[in-house]
Amino acid sequence: MRNRTSAPTGTTARSARRLRPTLAWAALATLALTACGAEKPDADRSPGSRADSAGAQQGVAFTEMLQQIARQCPASAPPQAPPSGPAHTSPSGERPPSDVEPIAPTAGPEVELNARDWCASNLHEQRIAQALWNLAEPTPAKVRKILNDLGYIDERIHDLKQSGTATRFLLDLRDRGGRLCLDGSAAGEQTVVDKCVAPATGPFTPEERPA
């Protein structure tokens, strides 16, 4: 007697037909979820990690801004100190009574900043002073916003506080071993931005500010 494979019953055939579309829809749903995940890589990232990423990007942009300004300056070297030789005499051989022999500085930006930082400081001073010159009622919040707009990040802005009608601040501009910082006072047309000296490494602790 020959064995014959029995044909599927009607119920079994209908179940198989229903199963195939169900599996197909499940596969499509899985692919759709995978695609959504690929399109939104930040969906599962915490607010803290996104903030860290934004801060890192700002830090990179700040460093690039410092280097772009520094590229307009000479290579690192001590700035030229004022002459310290004997005072010049007049053609008649007489020394002018007001002629005073200059004394070479022994401390401060003149001797502690290299040529690159000295030059870069002048460029930073100019762009910051111009931006603050016409600022009405220079509050710390307004000054911070202008500094941020110029590319100076919050991590490098120190001691931002009101002092009478002015707002004072310090900027840490150390880069590539330099010691440059700026001491600013935003006061409209009386705005002043001066260079100062910070430690080459470690926390930002500039030289003592005048009262």
Image (spheres, rainbow, N blue to C red):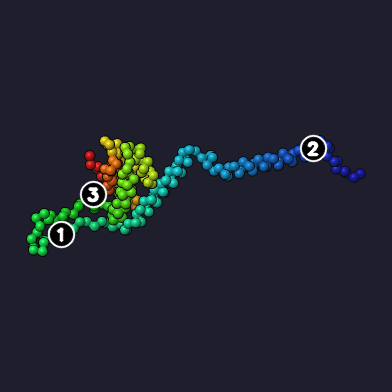
**N-term-proximal mark, 1 vs 2:** 2
Where, by quadrant of the figure, is residue 147 drawn?
top left
Q: Quadrant of the C terminus?
A: top left
Residue 195 appears in the rendering: yes
Where, by quadrant of the figure, is residue 15 drawn?
top right
- What residue is at 27 percent from the left and 47 percent from the top? 194
Rendered location of residue 31, percent (x, y): 64, 43
Q: Local crowd at mark 3 within 10 Å, few (<14), some, or many (≥20)?
A: few
Above or below for 198 versus 138: below
**N-term-proximal mark, 3 vs 1:** 1
Three-letter code for the amino acid on which mark 1 is drawn: Gly
Q: Nearer the viewer, residue 72 or 177?
A: 72
Residue bearing mark 2? 14
What is the number of the mark on residue 29?
none
Closer mark to the observer between disc 2 and disc 3: 3
Q: Secondary structure at mark 3?
A: loop
Left or right for 158, reference 51: left
Residue bearing mark 3? 108
Q: Nearer the viewer, residue 174 or 210?
A: 210
- What residue is at 91 percent from the left and 44 percent from the top? 1
Label 2 with label 3: CB-CB less than 8 Å:
no
Where, by quadrant of the figure, is residue 114 drawn?
bottom left
Rendered location of residue 56, percent (x, y): 43, 45
Label 3 with label 1: CB-CB less than 8 Å:
no
Three-letter code for the amino acid on which mark 3 is drawn: Gly
Left or right for 46, reference 82: right
Q: Local crowd at mark 1 within 10 Å, few (<14), some, or many (≥20)?
A: few
Residue bearing mark 1? 85
Q: Nearer the viewer, residue 110 or 163?
A: 163
Left or right for 191, reference 29: left
Q: How many marks?
A: 3
